[in-house]
Amino acid sequence: MVETSFTTQVLNAVNAVPYGQVASYGQIALMVGMPRAARQVGWVLNRLEDSAVDGSSNHPWWRIVNNTGRISIKGTKVLTQLTQKELLEKEGIEVSDDLTFDIERYRYRPQIAKLEEFELTPEYIEKFIQKYLD
């Protein structure tokens, strides 16, 4: 996978999501300063398939989900919605048979210091706080 600055930022944000927690595609986009790039976050994660399959990926792609608390990946030739469900369940996240769960219960809420690591402006951090931390 060719890594651009956006790709690197997305992967850094994905790596910040702790074990047993999740973030939405839009939340990751916000964390990297691109609030309307949720779909592009998904594209970056989709391109991880080869390294995810052979075990060389250090990026917990399965922790990134739809903002409604639903596993929404369409699946690829190897990775499926059930793969993501199993990986989330291994981390203690309770996922229903219909691939939904209580996202607010498991949502990653980064500390302000973590957001500052992404070099976001104070105004932008305040918007993030209003959306996810209040």
Image (cartoon, rainbow, N blue to C red):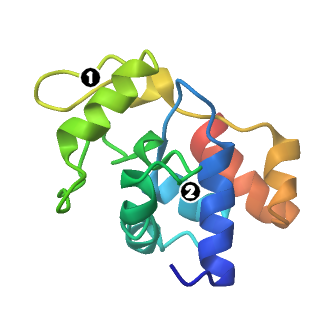
Question: How far from the left and from the top, in percent, is residue 105?
Answer: 46, 20
User: Who is closer to the viewer here, 30 or 2?
Assistant: 2
Amino acid identity at mark 1: Val
**In the image, what residue occupies the spot 29% across and 28% down?**
86
Question: How far from the left and from the top, in percent, is residue 87?
Answer: 37, 31
Q: Is residue 35 visible?
A: yes
Amino acid identity at mark 2: Ile
User: Who is closer to the viewer here, 44 or 118?
Assistant: 44
Residue 95, which numbered label?
1
Question: How far from the left and from the top, in percent, is residue 81?
Answer: 20, 43
Few, some or many residues within 10 Å of mark 1 (<14, 14–19, 20+): some
The total of numbered circles placed on residues is: 2
Of callouts 1 and 2, the N-terminal one: 2
| Vertical comparison of 12 with 107: above or below | below
**In the image, what residue occupies the spot 12% across and 23% down?**
97
User: Who is closer to the viewer here, 58 or 105?
Assistant: 58
The residue that disc 2 covers is 28
Residue 23, which numbered label?
none
Q: Is residue 33 visible?
A: no
Quadrant of the frame with the C terminus: top right
Residue ranking furthest to the left: 98
In 3D space, how far apart are the residues under numbered discs 1 and 2 (Cα atoms)?
21 Å
Q: Nearer the viewer, mark 1 or mark 2?
A: 1
| Quadrant of the image occupied by residue 103 | top left
